[in-house]
Amino acid sequence: MPERYVDAILKYLTSRDYQPLKPRQLARQMGVSEGDYGSFREAVKRLRDGGRIVLGARNALTLPEMSSRVTGTFRLNPRGFGFIVPETPNAHGDLFVAPPDTAGALSGDTVVANVKKRGRRDGEIAYGGVIVQIVRRGENRFVGTLQKADVHWFVMPDGARMPVPIIVRDISAAGPAAGSKVIVEIIRYPSPGELPVGVIVETLGGSGKIEAETLSVIRAHGLADEFPDDVLDETRRVVETFDPTASGVRKDLTDLLVVTIDPPDARDYDDAISLTSDGKGKLTLGVHIADVSNFVTEGGPIDTEARSRGTSAYFPRKVVPMLPEALSNGICSLQEAQPRFVKSAFITYDESANVVSTRLAEAVIRSSKRLTYLQAQSILDGKTSGFDKKVVKLLRNLQGLARRIETRRRKAGMLHLDLPAVELVFDDAQRVVDAVPEDDSYTHTMIEMFMVEANEAVARTLAERNRKFLRRVHPEPDPMGAKQMISFIRACGHRLPKEISREALQELLEAVRGKPESYAVNLAVLKTFRQAEYSPMQIGHFALASDCYCHFTSPIRRYPDLTVHRLVALHCRGELDNLPPDDVSELTRLGENCTAAEKRAEAAEQELREVLILQLLESKVGETFEGVITGVTNFGMFVQSPQFLIEGLLRMEDLGDDWWELDAKHGTLRGEHTGRKFRIGDVLSVRIAGVDVSKRQLNLALDKNAQTARKKKKKAPRSKKPKRPRTKGK
């Protein structure tokens, strides 16, 4: 069955840090067993015969060189250029397309391009593409605001996916009014010098209202916000037949002291915690996770829809859930005093919080107490009035264990970035009026430590059974990004070795803690990291200093967790060895889809947050604030508001009458005549010059008395709490 490895091999070879390996070496890196090596070798042969990989120097496997003609998916940048993601991967990656060579292609279009050399970059040949054919349009529907100029109607699309207005005709008196949020479908794409023509297919509401703006973002990112009838029908049957007393062979833990700790507005409680002692210095942590797999049959309507969605999306006043609410907020939610089915990870520790043993079980629990993070922190701070003494004792013991776990993990190299996080404040009209630092109480870190431990424990258990599963992987910084970060860190007056290690990063982050350059350094480290993703590859999780990690703790809102729960169920029942051979290619594709779904949901959440803040800043045009320079380019600087965590652009032409030299390596702009220098991390007084909500743009200008103020910069508000409190377990 060589097809089990085809996609997985290609995925591995396209990773940025892949170094050419011989087939046997590659198989070992990918965790292929000796018994499966025959199938793996046949997959390599098929890929070679098809020209999709080549055998290079010393019989090492590599991707083919860039061909003279490429077919792939186009991604348009707001500045006019774009990149083609080739259908057939090559050794040079995506193909750059300059603004004059896009041929009117839009993001998502399938295109054909001729390839030309553009010189050399970093010692390697750089290629460019000229699009010669648009094979298939990727998008024909866009969200925007309906506007009217004289007698002409048009829709101004939101964001940068469609950079020009779309002409619409035949707007009747009974149709949507100017200023309405609408979805427009293109019926005629433009020739050079023309505008596209479309027809309105849905009206979402008045522009500026949170309901309409939320729905606009949901539609723009292709999120499904309604469940099909067959999914709702199956959900009703599952709920009606659920009998919590019919727990079968599940371990009965209903008498165990168990608590949930969540945000105050949470409705789906997917994790609960317990802690027991053997009286001899060993503690056993119980992490109990809602057993979604018990209710979602693999391949059924609910599962198919959840797999398609991949994740839940969380907006300020709305959730787009992965599962119907009757499950996510109902029978799967670990509500106080209600018997609920769980998958439990029991992790036993010695006095130094080293893991002694791990045991997984299917169980039924009854949550003893539902606590918010602030309530739990209040108890730990000594305000125990009104709380059961057993709950108080449990929390104090949990805190002690969490601190020892955190100490152990930090010694192992776990990284913690000190970056600000804020919560938006709404008025009664549901408009943003302020932003305040997020709660950073230790209870967030406490729960995070336990979730990380459970995720790692489950991953190690499955790995020990030699099963492939969706891991949560976080690669090491790639050499190019690491090189740039080292140069920037040196410009800030600090040092990093050429070979970046977790220990070196820990020392750096500790050295800048509380200093003016702290924000800039933490931001540089963050930008050097590659995004974590889902994959069956044995890559490890760099930031967590874990060589074996998965997501297990949130199956209500993440599909990868649900797949892991199904394997845990088979493990608990002694049936894991009965599974057929693992299809690594299928897992690779599933991991890519889940990663894409995660990115899509995060992009939608971030865009709505940006829209709501820009609406507020429209009323503050002309006001000034001290912002942090977060980026420098050949067209200006990006400056972030520390209060709202939104970036604005200060264009080069607004910096003053000078010849500005960009030093991208060190993140600086320097005036040739004045000698004035702007650097990433500097604090700068800027004025809000203009706001364009539809284009998601905040335009800034220098305050007339502006001076960089690195020495005066206040430390950004700390927040150990993840940006989204529901992302327990990283």
Image (cartoon, rainbow, N blue to C red):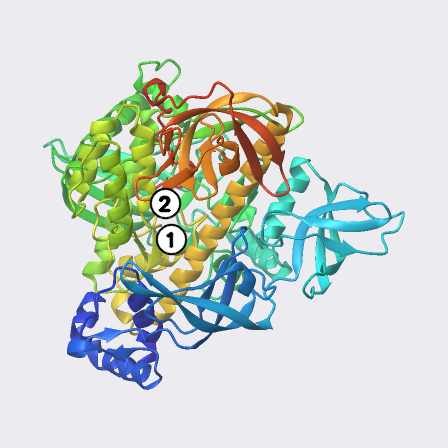
Q: Is residue 39 left or right of residue 719?
A: left
The relative height of residue 359 versus residue 715 in the rendered view (above or below) is below
SS type, badge 2: strand
Give the residue at x 35% y 44%. 664
Residue that carries the numbered disc 2 in the rendered image: 289
Residue type, mark 2 in image = Ile
- Quarter of the image where the C terminus is located: top left
Q: Residue at x 35, y 84 (%)?
A: 50
Q: Image quarter for residue 727?
A: top left
Which mark is drawn over residue 505?
A: none
User: CA gap, disc 2 to disc 1?
Assistant: 10 Å
Residue 709 placed where, x, y %? Answer: 37, 21
In percent of width and height, residue 251 lies at: 30, 48
Q: Which residue is mark 1?
A: 561
Residue 312 appears in the rendering: no
Asked whether 267 or 603 is in front, the reply is 603
Residue 131 visible, this orientation: yes
Q: Is residue 29 or residue 442 the one in the foreground?
A: 29
Q: Quadrant of the N terminus?
A: bottom left
